[in-house]
């Protein structure tokens, strides 16, 4: 039997990673060290605190994206 090299639980004959771990690999390629930071920040807590931390992490991401979007719209209206 061949298993996923990351989780070592899912059977993988033709690929190194199972579908779930391949998705994680894509996140790492996309977000690099941010993935490790989030995993350390979130998974080092108990379940209830994990949920709070996930909300906080997502809130920060959403606020940053809203600021970028506002700036983008603002620049767009100034150019026209
Ligand atoms: Zn896997």
Image (spheres, rainbow, N blue to C red):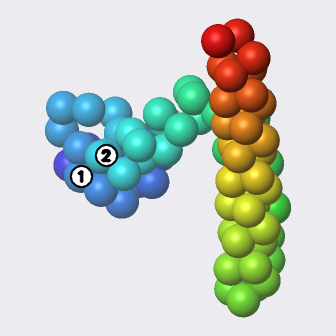
Report if residue 20 is visible in the image.
yes
Rate crowding at label 1 as few (under 14), some (14 to 19) or many (20 or more) other CA atoms within 10 Å.
some
Query: SS class of the residue under badge 1?
Result: loop
> 58 or 80, which lies in front?
80
**Residue ranking furthest to the top:** 79
> 15 or 53, which lies in front?
53
> 61 or 50, which lies in front?
61
Task: Kindly identify which numbered label has been placed on residue 11.
Answer: 1
Image position of 38 (left or right of 20):
right
Which residue is located at x 67 percent, y 30 percent? 73
Q: Looking at mark 2, is its residue's CB closer than 8 Å to ligand 1?
A: yes
Which residue is located at x 67 percent, y 36 percent? 69
Where does label 2 land, which residue?
18
Quadrant location of residue 54? bottom right
Across and down, in percent, residue 28 comes to 59, 35
Across and down, in percent, residue 1 comes to 20, 49
């Amino acid at each position: 039997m061949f298993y996923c090299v990351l989780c070592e639980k899912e059977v993988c004959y033709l690929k190194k990673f199972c579908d779930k771990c391949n998705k994680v690999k894509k996140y790492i390629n996309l977000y690099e060290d941010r993935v490790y930071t989030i995993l350390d920040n979130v998974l080092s807590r108990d379940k209830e605190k994990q949920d709070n931390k996930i909300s906080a992490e997502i809130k920060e991401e959403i606020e940053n994206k809203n600021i970028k979007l506002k700036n983008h719209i603002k620049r767009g209206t100034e150019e026209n």
